[in-house]
Amino acid sequence: MHSNTATRRNIDNNPNAEQLAAMKLVTAKVFQPVREWYGKPIRVNSFFRSPELNTRIGGSKTSQHCKGEAIDIDTSNDNKKLYDYIRDNLEYDQLIWEFGNESNPDWIHVSFSKNGNRKRQLLAKKVNGRTTYSVI
C-alpha cells in the first residue's frame, strides 16, 4: 500500500475489505509460495493501487493492481528464475515479463483472481515511448 507518489500527492491508497481480501489471496497463492521456494528476499515494487494513484502513475485503466489482484516482484538478477517457477508451478491469471531483455525481465507482474485464472503470459516492451503487450 505504500507509495511515494501517493504520499507526495496526498492520495489515499488504502484498500477496502474486498481489495484487501484479494491481496491476501495473491499473497497466499503466489507470493508466499514463491518466497518459500526462492529462499531469499524478494522486493515488492507495487501491489495495491487506488484508482487515483493508478491514474497518476499512468497505469492501465483495467489494472488488476486496483482490485488488489496483482503484485510486481523483483530480485534484480533472478527474475527469469522466478518467472519460470511461477509459470511452471503456480496458478495465476496474468504473468508479465516486464521489459528487461531476453535473459531477464526488469521485474515480474503476476496476478491471481478468485474468479478464475487464465494463465495468460505477456511480454511488456516500450515502443515509441508507449508500453505494449504481446502474448508469449
Image: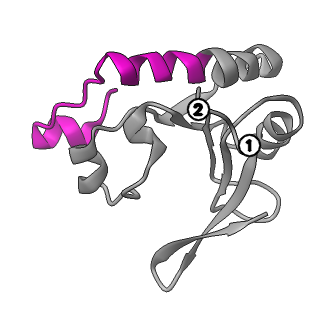
Q: What residue is shown at x 73% (from left), y 43% (from top)?
A: 79
Q: What residue is shown at x 41% (from left), y 35% (from top)?
A: 67
As drawn, is 88 to the left or to the right of 108? right
As drawn, is 77 to the left or to the right of 52? right
As drawn, is 22 to the left or to the right of 88? left
Mark 1 element type: helix
Q: What amino acid does circle 2 point to? A: Ser
* Residue 41 seen in the current view: no
State which quarter of the image contains the C terminus: bottom right
Q: What residue is shown at x 75% (from left), y 44% (from top)?
A: 119
Q: Which residue is mark 2?
A: 113
Mark 2 element type: loop
Magenta stretch: residue 123 in it?
A: no
Q: Is residue 133 above or below residue 77?
A: below
Going from N to C along the chain, the mark reached first, 1 or 2, is: 1
Residue 62 at x, y percent in the picture? 42, 53
State which quarter of the image contains the N terminus: top left
* Residue 123 seen in the current view: yes
Q: Is residue 114 above or below residue 85?
A: above
Extent of the magenta region: 1-27
Q: Which residue is mark 1?
A: 79
Residue 120 at x, y percent in the picture? 72, 51
Q: What amino acid does circle 1 point to? A: Asn
